[in-house]
Image: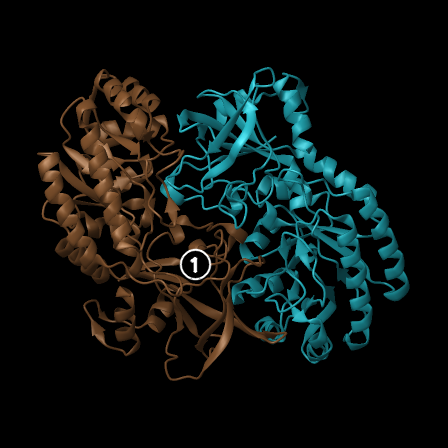
Chain colours: A brown, B cyan
Amino acid sequence: MLVRKQTARWQAGAADDSGSLSLAELAESFGTPFYLTVSAAIDERIGELREALPAGMRLLYSIKANPLLGIVARLAGQVDGFDVASAAELESALACGVSGGALSMTGPGKRDDDLAAAVACGARVVLESEDEARRLARLAAGATARVLLRVNPPFELAAEARMGGGPRKFGVDSEQAGEVLRAIGRLPLAFEGLHVYPGSNCLDAGAIAAAQRAALALAAELLPFAPAPLRTLNLGGGFGIPCFPGEQPLDLAALGEAMHEVAREAARRLPACELSLELGRYVVGEAGAYVARVLERKASRGRTYLILDGGLHHHWHATGALEGRRHLHFPMWVVGGDDRPLEEVTVCGPLCAPHDTWAENLSLPRAAPGDLVIVYQSGAYGAGASPVGFMQRPEAAQVLA
Amino acid sequence: MLVRKQTARWQAGAADDSGSLSLAELAESFGTPFYLTVSAAIDERIGELREALPAGMRLLYSIKANPLLGIVARLAGQVDGFDVASAAELESALACGVSGGALSMTGPGKRDDDLAAAVACGARVVLESEDEARRLARLAAGATARVLLRVNPPFELAAEARMGGGPRKFGVDSEQAGEVLRAIGRLPLAFEGLHVYPGSNCLDAGAIAAAQRAALALAAELLPFAPAPLRTLNLGGGFGIPCFPGEQPLDLAALGEAMHEVAREAARRLPACELSLELGRYVVGEAGAYVARVLERKASRGRTYLILDGGLHHHWHATGALEGRRHLHFPMWVVGGDDRPLEEVTVCGPLCAPHDTWAENLSLPRAAPGDLVIVYQSGAYGAGASPVGFMQRPEAAQVLA
């Protein structure tokens, strides 16, 4: 959505902040395919979030969503911290001038070197088990690691990726969390708070708000077991973006109102505890597009195929590789095709693999080899989350405008 | 299957061709996780194929299945040629001493630089459309490119990946193929034959044999339209390996008998035409294993979880990321655990993603952090086909023993 406004201007040849740009010129300069991320769209999204969020709620960016250094650097001045999933992501943040104290490391399978890197720079470690707490205390060897405990709540968030409720590899079950908190209290660790992340990519503001309220109630219940007052409660994220047909954008205004209530309730029940949100996709997803060139146009038994020079190796989530998504598609358009007649096409990637398909029977402006196709909503979980080496085709350039 | 014999010997501390090896020592030397491919198992599989295949049937290796240079080099002396999906794969084969004439390049979205690389070394280009034929003729500019035409047959192979029958991005529909063959005849291209590849990863020998017979009949029907006698007919591949519970190995003996019949029929109907098979997974899949270490053992609401230091970022196909496979699992075992009691565990990767799951409720020897878990049937479509950069964790070493 955000980048669509921008690309519409570019297609019209309008000047923008970064001078006069066109997608055709970018394609000429960088080759195709390429990812295009619009910094101004990231800034705009951060602005929307700051307006909606209660004052004092900390906003963290999950680097895994898009680890491009230019994006991390751009966000360094705009968010309150970063969540990292590995030592290498942590190094990226440090390289962009982020202080270790602004980092948290989360993930159910941290390696010893991940934990050591976190301790070395003073990052918070989000513990996912009691064993991990013991391992960290042993590795920290004298240094006092700052820790949060991740709790697997009794509820789930009905989202694309469910990460709470029922048995999970994530965190410590809420019914065990009291005991684990006491154990943490006996270890040489600096306990700072709790982390509850029940799901990812949800478009239902009411469901996210309900999960946040429930997470807050859970934190209040666990407070008596905590070895120190809660200084921070990470409410997770889960803010989704619409990528597939029929999906509606998250109602950020409604969610903002609900979060204000959560913040007031938190001030009452967890005094001096700051709240954090951990967002990735929502920050960058709509700020990025993927642009590929049509290599072939062909007919096969009643269908028209467009074969692009980019596919699942660059953009796993947008093609048919993910479970249950074979027949869905991201929003896409033929660059400069607004005045052409529409036709129904099946859009494919170039790989010798049938699931390398962007869309089946989609209505698009008539396109020919050489035309550019733009795939929107592509700023998150793109190249960084895709099998870029598959069939050893060229990597996609990553352009930050 | 093939590598299981080998690892059983290693676990027993037996010496093998490469000296005395143990998985624990490999883990110590290379760190975990790592891929282990056993050259002797590849050799053994090639031997089985040569025994089953009719004399004179050419055996090609599809580099996409496992592009490790050591594997390509090992196979260079054992197969009759290589199929490549990109210029980079082609360069790999040349770097291993394979002659350009032994290469074919296949894929529905070849870039101009792919085609140019093929022409430059004398590789055969498997054309997927009439437009591609024209593009190649233009790019070849004086050189006469050697070409096959890929035909989308009227039938499919009921396999994991269906690539023939109905409308397809692959090749030229059989009912259009006559016309396209005539067009190719008018271009400055050296026509050499046909290519029919209806599907991949099939375990039913009868179905593969039927598809081969049908491909041969199709080639004979198209013969009158061909600009030159067929010198080669690529019958595709599709030989699968059992990876999931209940799957039975392909009956290679039965398929071999059927292929002898196909070869006799081909000698009658397509004189002087050699037959080719294009295999990837079947050559290397059972020769490779993936070995990861248990980082965490945890209980959550009645389930026991093992969290490994490797996951979907290294081995996409074996985890729950692929469509419809969430609840299936590759064969796996705890190294050195034969004498331990069995227990039901859910085996996960380390990523902050719920689909990073190896197996749910699988019966395995009781394991503790530090133990190694081996995943068999992992020699094909492993690291090369996985999102190795996701969350920026360390790459898996690739050990060729």
Q: Is residue B111 left or right of residue B208?
A: left
**Image location of residue A219, percent across then percent down:** 21, 33
Q: Is residue B196 left or right of residue A123?
A: right
Tally the numbered discs. 1
Q: Nearer the viewer, residue B245 or B161?
A: B245
Q: Residue B9 sits in which quadrant?
A: top right
**Image location of residue B314, percent across then percent down:** 48, 40
The subunit carrying tag 1 is A
**Image location of residue B263, percent across then percent down:** 86, 56
The type of residue carrying mark 1 is Ala
Q: Nearer the viewer, residue A367 or B14?
A: A367
Q: Residue A371 sits in which quadrant?
A: bottom left
Instruction: Please tell me whether mark 1 sits on a helix, a strand or a loop.
Output: helix
State which quarter of the image contains the C terminus of chain B.
top right
Q: Is residue B278 left or right of residue B299?
A: right
Q: Residue B116 sits in which quadrant?
A: bottom right
Q: Residues within 10 Å of mark 1 (few under 14, many from 20)?
A: many
Residue A258 visible in the snapshot: yes
Residue B334 visible in the snapshot: no
Q: Nearer the viewer, residue A167 or A117?
A: A167
Residue at the image position 66 percent from the left and 71 percent from the top = B172
Residue at the image position 57 percent from the left and 19 percent from the top = B337
Q: Is residue B107 above or below residue A217?
A: below
**Image location of residue A282, percent across then percent down:** 27, 54
Judging by the rendered image, the residue that carries numbered circle 1 is: A318
Residue at the image position 40 percent from the left and 25 percent from the top = B298
State which quarter of the image contains the N terminus of chain B.
top right
Q: Is residue A240 above or below residue B229?
A: above
Q: Is residue A250 above or below residue B136?
A: above
